[in-house]
Image: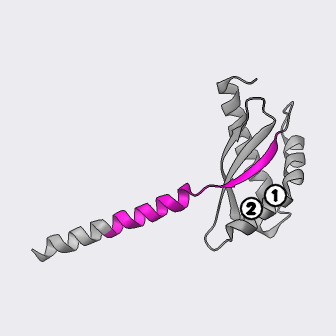
Amino acid sequence: MADDKRKRRIEELIQRELGGVLINYPRHPLFTKITITAVEVSPDLSVAKVFFSVFDGVDVALAKKALDDESKFLRKTLAHDVNLRITPRFNFFYDESIKRSMKLSKLIDAAIASDESRHHET
């Protein structure tokens, strides 16, 4: 079992390095349009939940399929690039937080604009 500080360092390392693998080894055309937003490893470090986001216009299902299909390659490349006793298996999950925050930001901007237009009318 890894302590919390070590676990966090490993999560950050995997996030950074996996993002680099997607850019430096684009085995799939979608790799360059995927961003790794977070990684959570299990207490025994054998499994990692990898959260990703995609650029506008990219089909999330296709991106997830590309990551799932290339999971062994990604794991092998990460194991080669990073010195970990155990390289975790990856489970990929779409991170909607960026999309939600953009939507919220647009709603706030619209509310502010509406409020300002009402304020100028009076």
Direction from residue 88 to residue 12 in the image, left or right: left
Residue drawn at 78 percent across, 29 percent down:
44
Direction from residue 97 to residue 21 in the image, left or right: right
Residue drawn at 58 percent across, 58 percent down:
96
Residue at which label 2 appears? 64
Residue 7 in sight from this viewpoint: yes
- x and y percentages locating residue 25 in the rendered image: 84, 58
- Tell me which amino acid carries mark 2: Lys
- x and y percentages locating residue 98 in the rendered image: 54, 58
Q: Quadrant of the N terminus?
A: top right
Magenta residue span: 88-110
Residue drawn at 61 percent across, 55 percent down:
95
Say if 89 sits above or below 5 in the image.
Answer: below
- Are dots 1 and 2 in contact, CB under 8 Å? yes
The one of 92 and 117 positioned closer to us in this rendering: 92
- 86 part of magenta stretch: no
Helix, strand or loop for the magenta stretch, by majority:
helix
Residue at which label 1 appears? 68
Other residues around mark 2 within 10 Å, as few (<14) / some (14–19) / many (≥20)? many
Residue 25 in sight from this viewpoint: no
